[in-house]
Image (tube, helix red, strand yellow):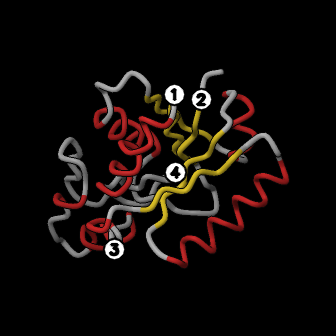
């Protein structure tokens, strides 16, 4: 049976921390869907299309990675894709508590889905998309915090 995983997130924008988790997850699964979520409750800084384009460029040479966009429940997406695993990265103990709760609810919704937690590499523990957006908002250079293929070029108006 093919091991299929979904790595859901907003990726607003994709960071080197995201890249690290994805690269480390690759040997564990036959196919990884990077699922960029559309959340109507949350204002995104970069359009869904821009975020998906960046992720596609970063992982263009990796045939086991598939980049998709979605809305709705992640477990429903997993069922649609035949995925048995959800990948989540953990930076801090607070992340663990939050992600553990979601993982337990997802398992109640679909007992066939297992959440796999990967610890963030130490050099990326303090990095998240909010920090990158804040650097951009204040005119700073955030290029060291995103994959080299990502050209941020500044912070646009919020979109979705």
Q: The residue tagged with tag 4: helix, strand or loop?
A: loop
> Which numbered disc, 2 or 3, marks the residue that appears first in the sequence?
2
CA separation, marks 1 and 3?
A: 28 Å
Residue picked out by circle 3: 126
CA separation, marks 2 and 3?
A: 30 Å
Residue picked out by circle 4: 160
Whether the residues at callouts 2 and 4 have beta carbons within 8 Å, the answer is: no
Residue picked out by circle 2: 3
Mark 3 or mark 4, which is nearer to you? 3
Mark 4 or mark 1, which is nearer to you? 1
CA separation, marks 3 and 4?
A: 26 Å
Q: Is residue 66 above or below residue 143?
A: above
Residue 84 percent coordinates (x, y): 68, 36
Q: Nearer the viewer, residue 84 or 27?
A: 27
> Which numbered disc, 1 or 3, marks the residue that appears first in the sequence?
1
Q: The residue tagged with tag 2: helix, strand or loop?
A: loop
Res 89 label: none
Whether the residues at callouts 3 and 4 have beta carbons within 8 Å, the answer is: no
Mark 3, other Cα within 10 Å: few <14 / some 14–19 / many ≥20:
few
Residue 70 percent coordinates (x, y): 61, 39
> Which numbered disc, 2 or 1, marks the residue that appears first in the sequence?
2
Residue 30 percent coordinates (x, y): 51, 26
Mark 4, other Cα within 10 Å: few <14 / some 14–19 / many ≥20:
few
Q: Is residue 74 left or right of residue 148?
A: right
């Amino acid at each position: 049976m093919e091991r299929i995983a979904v790595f859901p997130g907003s990726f607003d924008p994709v960071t080197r921390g995201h890249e690290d988790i994805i690269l480390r997850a690759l040997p564990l699964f036959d196919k990884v869907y990077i699922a960029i979520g559309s959340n109507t409750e949350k204002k995104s800084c970069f359009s869904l299309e821009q975020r998906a384009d960046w992720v596609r460029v970063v992982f263009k040479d990796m045939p086991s990675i598939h980049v998709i966009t979605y809305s709705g429940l992640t477990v429903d997406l997993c069922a649609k894709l035949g995925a048995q695993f959800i990948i989540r990265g953990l930076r801090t103990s607070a992340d663990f508590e939050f992600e553990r709760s979601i993982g337990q609810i997802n398992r109640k919704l679909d007992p066939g889905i297992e959440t796999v937690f990967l610890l963030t590499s130490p050099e990326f523990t303090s990095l998240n998309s909010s920090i990158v957006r804040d650097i951009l908002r204040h005119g700073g250079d955030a290029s060291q915090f995103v994959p080299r293929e990502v050209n941020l070029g500044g912070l646009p108006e919020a979109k979705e």
